Each structure stands twice: as C-alpha cells, then as structure tokens.
Amino acid sequence: MELLNIKKLDLDHKKVFIRCDFNVPMDEFGNISDDRRIKGALATINYCLDQDCSIILASHLGRPKGEVNEKYSLAPVAKRLSNILKRKVILAKDVVGEDAFAQVEALKCCDILLLENLRFEPGETENDSDLSKKLASMADIYINDAFGVSHRAHASVEGITKYFTETSMAAGFLLEREINFFGKLINDPVRPFAAIVGGSKVSGKLEALINLLPKVDKVFIGGGMAFTFLKQMGYDIGASLVEDDLLADAQHIMDEAKKLGVKFYLPVDVIAAEKFSADAVSKIVTAQEIPSEWMGLDIGPATVRLYREGLNDVQTVLWNGPMGVYEMEKFARGSSKIAHFVADSFATTVVGGGDTADLVQRIGLDEEMSFISTGGGASLELLEGKILPGVAPLIITEK
C-alpha cells in the first residue's frame, strides 16, 4: 500500500499536529527507562522544524481511564524530548482546555508544544467526534507517526482524519517505515522464512498464526500458548496455562501447517515450577510429563537446541512473543538463548514489538536485530492481514 507522503505536503510555516507514541516505560521513581519511542519520532519532528513549522505533539501514556492522574503526566517525556532536541518543549496543562488552546495560539515558528496525556480525556478512547474536531482545529496539517496505536480507532488517531484532506495529512517517517517493512516482510520475504511465536495465549495470536501459515516455511511455538497445542496432542501439561476453548483451533492450525508443508515446532521439554513465583522450586521435565500440580514457565534446554537447529538455515526471522516468563530471571533463559542465536544469525531479523522488544532490549541485543517494531498490537494486526484504522485514511486510493 502507498501512503500519503509528508514530503508532498506544503508545510512552510504551518501549524502541524503530530500524533506520536510516547507511551514509554517508567521505573518506580517516574524516570523513563527506555526512550526508543521518543527517538523514533525525531525524524518527523526535525523534518517539520526544517520547514519552519510550529509543532503540536500529542500522545497517550499508560491507562489513566479518562481521568487526570499525575502519575501519567507527560512531563517526563517533555523533559527528555527537550534534552534530545536541545530546544524547549512546552508542556500544556491540559489536552483541549484553556491552557492548551492559549499555548497553540501563542506558537511561533519552530516552537514545540506537547499536549498533556490524550487519555486524560475520556473521549480519546471512545473516538469522540467532538474531541477529534477540537484537536483538528489546532493545526493546518495532521501527521500520524504513532504506529503503536494505529490499530486503535481513537479520536487522535482515526477520528481526527475526518477533518483533514489528502493535501493536509500524511504518514510520518516512522509510521511509513513500519508499514513498508511489514508489507515487504509478509509479501516478499527472503526464504526460508521462519516465525517464532510466543506469549501467554493462543487467543491473542490465533488470527496472526492462521494468516502467517501460507507465507512462512517454519513456525516455532513458545511461551504459555504452547500448552494449548501440547494438551491437544494428548500430553500431560499439569497446571500449565491452557485455553480449553481453543483446543480445536490449535488442531486446525497444526493440520493447516501439515497441509501446507510448513514445519511446525513445539517444545519437547520445559522448565516447570510448583508455583508462579520467582523463588519457586523448578526442574526440567519433558513436555509429555509435566507433574500434575506444576506449571511450565519456560522452554527447556533440549527445545533450545532443537529450535537452534531448525533456525540454522533460515534467511528471514519474524519473532513475536517470548518463550517463557522472561520477567523472572529463573524463567528467562530460553528466551535469552533464542534471542542470542537469532541476533548472531545472518538472517534478516524482525522483532514484532511489545514484550519481545522489551526482552531483547533488556539483554542488550536491540542493536543486533535488523528491525524492531514500535508496536506490538499494531504489528500483530498487520500480520493478521488487517488494515489498521489509523492507517486506512492515509492510504492513497486509485483515482
């Protein structure tokens, strides 16, 4: 798909509204622990500054549920952005209140204003047309550079586009790069093409798996979702996480893989624990014989070796979802070892955002991957073959 291009807009001395994704992780002291999403917006911001624009930035942070909550203020983002850009970033006290509009009115050439957390307004997640209209009235131009929320039909993402035309809105550089990269990955990958799919539930990845099967050569399953497949195969999975209502879907995916000639890998051993806890007693067991009161929380060493062998010849790897409970050090080894192997390979390696991006960043491998998406949910919906609500209005239609 071809998107409306920011370089084709007349931006000279215009007010530009840029929807960004500054939903960054914070530590217990309110400090930003990973600023990749902020840095991801710099190309678009700097391009607009070069056109002598005045800039209005907008983002959400966390889930304040439509109420003002100091914990979710964008003040740390404004501070970090100021430091990176080496210029002042003004933080409005509200989103569409008196202060925000007064600050917008006062903007001069190359000024940067950051609105407060969009989700302080209940209308944001409800795609409220009144809120969309107010946000749109602030600017001459609308740019969506927030891939991470483009799968959401929210007021600042989808609703706002109704108040701009093809000559006054476009995709930012980050959004365009994500869409183009995933488009090429899905439609024209260098083969063999492998998908590593993990995470806790099959339900969250079901459509993506079904859509991926005709496109990939190998699938490697890990994380809690593996146990739904293992139970369907008749294995004793103990107290491991399972979605009984999706057993038939799991069988359908395995049958479809077989029919298409796709190699489908499941864990042969797991690290099992007697409880879901970092200090739980744990041991290595085969995937067929997990003790009745125990639960599998990571792939085992034999599975790591098996997956390494299977990945040895692939030229493209798409990874979405960790292999175990990587947040607990005791159950992070499987994910870590697969991450190191993928990073060291000569394949094009694509990390599908969310937990997997957090995992590779934690172990210092983010620079070793070919591409890390900024949006977990958005990248998953692209893999499912969906057109994202925030992207649809920006697609150039045939005249």
Image: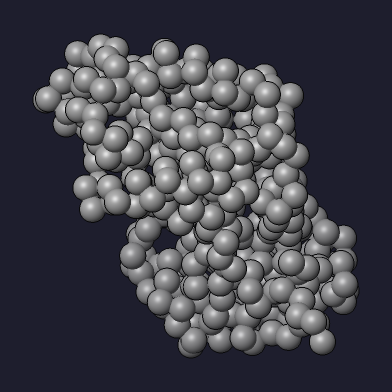
225 on left or right of 360: left
**Residue at the spot x=78%, y=68% of the render?**
2
Please name the residue shown 29% across and 12% down the image.
Answer: 284
- Rendered-image quadrant of the C terminus: bottom right
Q: Residue at x 60, y 25 (%)?
A: 311
Is 111 displayed left or right of 92 in the figure?
right
| Image coords of residue 59 (percent x, y) | 55, 61
Left or right of residue 273, residue 167 in this image: right
Q: Is residue 364 visible to us here?
A: no
User: Could you tell me if residue 191 is visible in this image?
Assistant: yes
Q: Nearer the viewer, residue 282 or 213?
A: 213
Quarter occupied by residue 297: top left
- Residue 393: percent from left, percent from top: 65, 77
Number of numbered discs on residues: 0
Q: Quadrant of residue 199?
A: top left
Q: Which is nearer the eye, 228 or 262?
A: 262
**Image quarter of the N terminus:** bottom right
Closer to us: 163 or 27: 163
Image-quadrant location for residue 368? top right
Q: Is residue 345 above or below residue 382?
A: above
192, 336: nearer the viewer? 192
* Residue 302, x across and y down, in percent: 42, 13
Specify the farthest residue to the front: 259
- Toward the left, the furthest residue is 293
Q: Which residue is rendered at x = 48% and y = 35% of the image? A: 264
